[in-house]
Image (cartoon, rainbow, N blue to C red):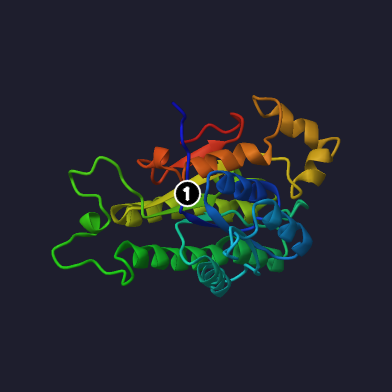
Amino acid sequence: MALSLALDGKVALVTGGSRGIGAETVRLLREAGARVAFSFREARPRAEELAAECGGADAAGNPLCLAIEQELSSPADGRALVESAVRAMGRLDILVVNHGVWPPEDAPIARMDEAQWRRTLAVNLDAVFGLVQAAVARFENQIDGGNGKIRAGQTARTAAGLDAGATSCGAKGHIVLISSTAGQRGEAFHADYAVTKGALISLTKSLSTELAPKGILVNCVAPGWVATGMTASTLADPAAGPRITAAIPLGRVATPREVAGPVVFLCTPLAGFISGEVLNVNGGAVLMG
C-alpha cells in the first residue's frame, strides 16, 4: 500500500517562490499534484524557469505553475497578489507565506536605522496581513459555494463540515506561515527580523482559534539556519559559519527541501487535525513548543 500525500485539484499560492525554501515548496506542491502560483519581485528569468520546470501550462493553456511579479511591502500588495492568483488559477486552497527580508549586516538597536526597521516590518508583517486577509475571504467564499455565508440553521462548524459526527476535518483552506527560530528566542543585532517572526507565531495562534471552526487550518513552520541565498554570506564567513553549525545538534544547516517538506505535509489530509502548531525545523537547535 502506497502512502499518499496527494493534493490533486488544489491550488496553492507561495510567496517568495522563486528561490530557496519557496522554490522547493513550489516543486513539492507540484509533485503532490497541486497547481501553484508563486510570487517573485526581481528575478524574472529564474522565476519563469521554475514555472516552466514545474509544468507551465496544460494542453488547454490552463496554468499548472505560474510566476507572478509582485512587490510585497504593504497590505494592498498582499491583497493584490491573492487577487492575481485567483484570477489566473480560478480558486485558492493553500497559502504559504514564505517571503521576507533579513538584513544580513549586524545592527545594534541603538544604531539601527529607522528605515531598516520600517522596511523589515512592512515586508515581513504588513504584506502578510493583506495576504491572509484576502486568502481567508476567498476560503470563506468557497465554503458555501460562492457567497461565503452560513446558511440558516447552520453553525460555523457545521457549515465547514465539522459536525460532531465527522470523522475527518475535510479542511476548507490551509495557511502556513514561515517564521524562524529568531521569532522564538530572539536574535541579537537583528531585532527587526526577530520581532516580525515572533509576530507570525502569535498570528498563527490567533488565526487558528478564529478560523479552525470554519475548517481553515493555520500553522507555522519555524526553520533554523538554512542554506539559501539570503544566508550564504553569513554561513560562508570563516568565524560565523563554524559557530552556527556548532550550535546545531545535527552538525549542519538545513537544505531548503528539508523545510519545504514539512510545509507541504501541513497542507495534506494527514495533517487534518493539526492547527495552531509551530513546527520546528532546526536540527534540534531550539527546543520550543
Left or right: where 211 falls relative to 63: left
> Which is more toward the observer, 153 or 288?
153
Left or right: where 230 falls relative to 71: right
Q: What kind of element bears circle 1? A: loop
Q: Position of residue 56 (x, y in %)?
A: 65, 58
Left or right: where 28 falls relative to 227: left
Q: Position of residue 67 (x, y in %)?
A: 65, 63
Question: The disc labelled 1 sits on which kind of residue?
Answer: Asp
Instruction: Kindly identify which residue carries mark 1.
Output: 8
- The picture quadrant where one finds residue 127 is bottom right
In this orientation, does residue 18 appear?
no
Q: Position of residue 208 (x, y in %)?
A: 37, 52
Q: Residue at x 72, y 27 (%)?
A: 246
- The picture quadrant where one finds residue 184 is top right
**Does 192 sit above or below residue 249?**
below
Q: Which residue ends up furthest to the front in the rendered image?
A: 59
Q: Quadrant of the N terminus?
A: top left
